[in-house]
Structures are given as C-alpha cells and as structure tokens.
Amino acid sequence: MRFLSFGVIISFGLSSLLAAQAQQQVSNAQVTALVEALRKAAPQSGSPSNGYYSEWKVKPETLKGWSKYCLKQELTPTQFENTATARKVVSCIMRRELDKELHATNNNETAAVRSVACWWMTGEYTGCDSGFTSSFVQKVVSEYQQQRSKPVSSAPKPSESQR
C-alpha cells in the first residue's frame, strides 16, 4: 500500500510539472521574432575583422559553446558566418533563454525579452538600465514587438549575406 501511494504522489507530481511546462513553452513565432530583433539590433562596427561573427555579432568563444550545445559539435567562426547555420544556433539558444525568462517573469513577454537582451549583451539578466546596454535592450524590445505584430506567415527578409 505504501508503494502504491508513493507511486500516485510521484505520478501526480510529474503530470503537474509537465502541465506547467506545456503551458509556458516558447512559440516558434516568439523565437523567430527575438532572433530577428537581435540581428537588427546588433551593433554595426563597419569593420569585418572586429572579432565578432555572423549578423548577430557573436564572439568566437561563445559560438563554440553554443554550437556544441545546439548542434553537438563546435563550429569555427568561418562556419558560423553561414547565415542559416548562425540563425539555427542563435534560435536554439534564444529558445532556451526566452523559456527560462518567461518562467522567471510569470509569462511577461516584454520583461522576458528585456532580460534576454540584457543577457545577450552582458551575460547578466539585469543591470541594463543605462548607457549603451539600455539603448541596445530597448532597440531589441522595439524590434521584437514589431516582429510579433507582423502576420505569422511573414518570414524575415533575406539579408545581404543571404542573397
């Protein structure tokens, strides 16, 4: 009898956990909007050899860890310059981070995007209230809201490097 009640408790706990996770899953539209917002907000240095790669301006040491996490293999900066590959990796990471922050903000989409944009720039989810980081975060939020207001079927326009 003791094992039966323990099994019922475990079963109930797991089903509650799965239900909560299903309620707050990040949609493809949210991820696509955030990835595009980050691309559009990326600082433009004008120098191709500034040490950052792809249209998202990712550091080489960062892209190695992200690609290993998302693709199960490390990419070189040259491989990451491929826009489709970079978009796949950035989308994977943004899905993870946005999901985490939607949970942390009780499903407040704007607050979650703000936190993720701050994390993208600084590695921290808070502290982007002034200066360049504040401007970047606000640009990401604004771009994100524009992307989310578009019809779902509209895909991002090809960039110069995709043509």
Image (tube, rainbow, N blue to C red):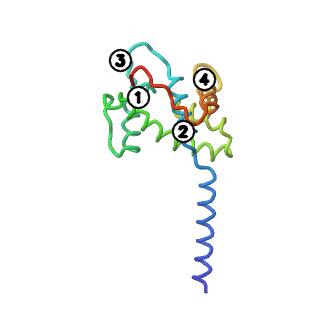
Q: Which mark's residue is nearer the viewer, 3 or 2?
A: 2
Residue 8 image offset from top left, x and y in percent: 61, 76
* Residue 18 quadrant: bottom right
Q: Which mark's residue is nearer the viewer, 4 or 3?
A: 4
CA–CA distance between discs 2 and 1? 21 Å
Q: Is residue 135 left or right of 82 when viewed as pictured?
A: right
CA–CA distance between discs 4 and 2? 16 Å
Q: Which mark is residue 139?
A: 4
The residue positioned 35% from the left and 29% from the top of the image is: 82
Earlier in the chain: of badge 3 and badge 2, it is 2
Q: What element carries label 3?
A: loop
Earlier in the chain: of badge 3 and badge 1, it is 3
Q: Which amino acid does label 2 sit on?
A: Val
| Residue, disc 3 | 49
Q: What residue type is labelled 1?
A: Lys
Depth check, front residue: 51 or 102? 102
Which quadrant of the figure contains the C terminus?
A: top left
* Residue 68 quadrant: top left
Q: Residue 84 carries which label?
A: none
The residue positioned 33% from the left and 29% from the top of the image is: 77
Q: Dot 4 surroundings within 10 Å: few (below 14), some, or many (20 or more)?
A: some
Q: Which amino acid does label 3 sit on?
A: Ser
Q: What residue type is labelled 4?
A: Lys
Q: Residue 59 carries which label?
A: 1
Q: Is mark 4 on a helix, strand or loop?
A: helix
* Residue 105 quadrant: top right
Q: Is mark 2 on a helix, strand or loop?
A: helix
CA–CA distance between discs 4 and 3? 24 Å
Earlier in the chain: of badge 4 and badge 2, it is 2
Residue 116 image offset from top left, x and y in percent: 57, 35
